[in-house]
Image: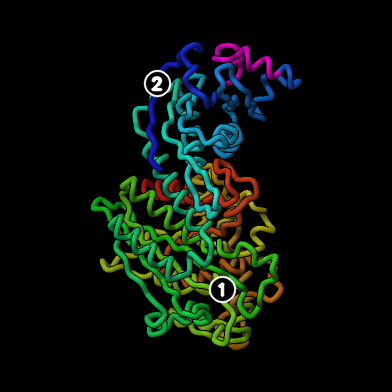
Amino acid sequence: MSLKLAQFSQISSENTLTSYKHMLFVLAENEAENIPYSGILHTKLKRTHSEYKDLYKTPLTTDLPNGGIASFVVLEEKLNTFQRHTLLRKAIAPLLDEQPLELAIFVFGDEATRESNACAAYYVATVNAAKLPNRKKDDKFKALENISIHGYAAQHDYAYVNARVAGNTLCRELTITPPNELTPTIYREKIATLAKEFSWKHEEFDMAKLKEMGAGAFYSVGQGSNPQDAAIVHLTYLPIDAKKNIALVGKGICFDTGGHNLKPAKYMQGMHEDMNGSAVALGILLAATQLQLPVRLDCWLAISQNHIGPLSYKQNDVVTALNGMTIEIVHTDAEGRMVLADTLTLASRVNENGQLPDAIIDFATLTGTMISALGTRMSGVIANRAELANEAIQAGKVAGERIVAFPYDDDYETDLDSDIADIMQCTIDGDADHIHAARFLGRFIENDVAWLHTDLSSASNEGGLGAVSTDTSGFGVGFGLALIKRLISSH
């Protein structure tokens, strides 16, 4: 999406605003009178038996004499980023529903308030104006072309916001794409095209290579598909001024049937989005590249499908992972941790320069128990370093993507003891599976590298989440980008 941004330090009088047809007024507390169209606003409030203070919780939209439409919302100072984004999303939605070519944003309050609200409103507007895959015959999408911000003229060009929007949009585009249009073969081709466009180093470990390497955990899942087009894809962004070395790992199951433990139709619906973790990792990589962040990023994408067939892995199979550990298969629908196991091993090894990553961050739509624990409004993380989990929580607060940390206590791993192998893949009853999955994955991290596991329970939330109005939220791109920035500056 390419749009023009104009900024004005002052807000013009009501008479000069008649050229705008779609306007958002982001108001400060106790500023009911000193705003354009205050008479129209108060008339609408009176007609709907509302008061100005009601705008603190519920935006109001009203028609204007010039045939335009305006939304009014008050953002209190006490609100956190998630709350601000949520109110702005609700205020902007009726404006963007009309697919305007131009949107005018007006911010009020002191300078710090206007700066914060201008940036937040610009992000919410641009992320929701992005075009996403739509296969409807009568799709009449019109792109937003211009945004003007009145009341604050920033000293920068909103580069961070634009990069975050680009990453979030890429994540949602890929995640929403129908499964027949995003098989592992097609997905790998798209990634290769992105790598060429953004000058990322690109390599693939296909099924033949993985079998030769002994990556039996990943291979066991990929072998059930025809064609056997699964692969671990490795991308590298390496600026000359890199201060840290961070690995991103993403689960990329393009469709998950559950394998021999076949999902019922209700739970198979939407399983083309089981590759969301890989899309989040790609979105972060894109945003970091556009921002030219001083960090080496190695992005490892575990791309496969989980199909049922004569060659599919099954319960009680024992397979040998890349690190030599043997795994007893308990449930074939726990395929995500299988493909991630070997991918995490690769990510935790020294690179071509003999360096280990300073941290590994993985993203995966992994367990139903994380959804049971949190619902779909926030996501959980589990880390092998308490300080890394704390950094993740703070990054989530900054980004407006809420994060909750869960324990990594080693006694949970005794539930994965196997009589025949080094470890069981999961338990058959599935209690505390989000913690069991983390304990399982942690066994495949080599060299005691700091590692954060992100279980994306909020990858999709009906009605939108935070800043984003679509069910598929792109959650994780903003949080991951904020976390990388924190890690770059940390000691």
User: Residue beneath label 1, please?
Assistant: 335
Quarter where residue 54 is shown: top right
Residue 398 is left or right of residue 236, and the answer is right
Foreground: 240 or 181? 181
Discs 2/1, front: 2
Which mark, residue 8? 2
Horizontal and vertical percent position of residue 226: 49, 80
Horizontal and vertical percent position of residue 66: 55, 18
Q: What is the count of numbered marks?
A: 2
Which mark, residue 264? none
What separation in Å lies between label 2 and label 1 (alpha carbons)? 53 Å
Foreground: 120 or 421? 120
Q: Is residue 6 visible?
A: yes
Colouring used for the render? rainbow
Q: Residue at (42%, 39%) from the top-left corner?
A: 161
Q: What amino acid is at disc 2?
A: Phe
Q: What amino acid is at disc 1?
A: Glu
Local secondary structure at mark 2: strand
Task: Reply above or below: 101 against 50.
Answer: below
Horizontal and vertical percent position of residue 60: 64, 26
Look at the image and say whether residue 34 sits in the magenta stretch. Answer: yes
Q: Residue at (59%, 88%) from the top-left corner?
A: 420
